[in-house]
Image (tube, rainbow, N blue to C red):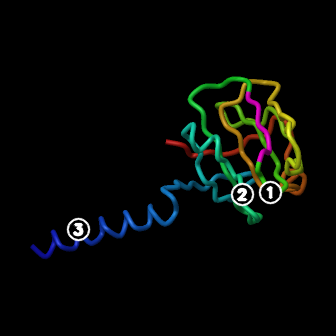
Amino acid sequence: MKRIAILLLLLACCQCCAAATGGARFKTIYVADRPFRVEIADTPEKHALGLMQRRTIKSDYGMLFVFAEEELRSFWMKDTLITLDMIFLNSAGQVVAMHESVPPCTADPCPDYESGLPARYVLEVAGGTARKLKLQLGDKIFIPID
């Protein structure tokens, strides 16, 4: 009986934690051997929301957009309040395109930022991060995705 009560308590705690983070899922990835805590955007709803309305971003934080297939990708900065680097990656985690220090969009229509080559992932990090880490096309980023 005691075990069941403990199990129910743990389950309730897990549900509270998930609710507090909006059900967000996080992973640690490595960019130039530096760890980044990334929020996983793996549904159409999360893809559409992205980092909109966020006022700040930590230097070791980002969002990783995960798609089922590799294909040409196009992103924009609609309702995004912070400058970001967009790093497009193929299925192997190799950088295929980058747009550095992309400013927030202040007027419609917002410009599109395209991958140019097929990409399965898009990593958004604080603007200037790619330059700071000397990230280049062809570099690999370690992504431990299930």
* Horizontal relation, residue 108 to residue 51: left or right: right
Q: Amino acid at mark 3?
A: Leu
* Horizontal relation, residue 140 to residue 24: left or right: right
Q: Residue furthest left?
A: 1
Q: Are marks 3 and 2 in contact (CB under 8 Å)?
A: no
The residue wearing badge 1 is: 81
Residue displayed at 22% across by 73% down = 6
Which label number is shown at residue 53? Answer: 2
Residue displayed at 64% across by 41% down = 48
Spatial CA span between label 3 and label 2: 37 Å
Residue displayed at 78% across by 45% down = 78
Task: From the top left corner, tell me how far across and down residue 12 is, in percent.
Answer: 31, 67
Task: From the top left corner, tell me how far across and down residue 61 is, in percent.
Answer: 70, 60
The stretch of residues the image draws in magenta is 73-78
Nearest-to-viewer mark from 3 and 2:
2
Other residues around mark 1 within 10 Å, as few (<14) / some (14–19) / many (≥20): some
Q: Are marks 3 and 1 in contact (CB under 8 Å)?
A: no
The residue wearing badge 3 is: 7
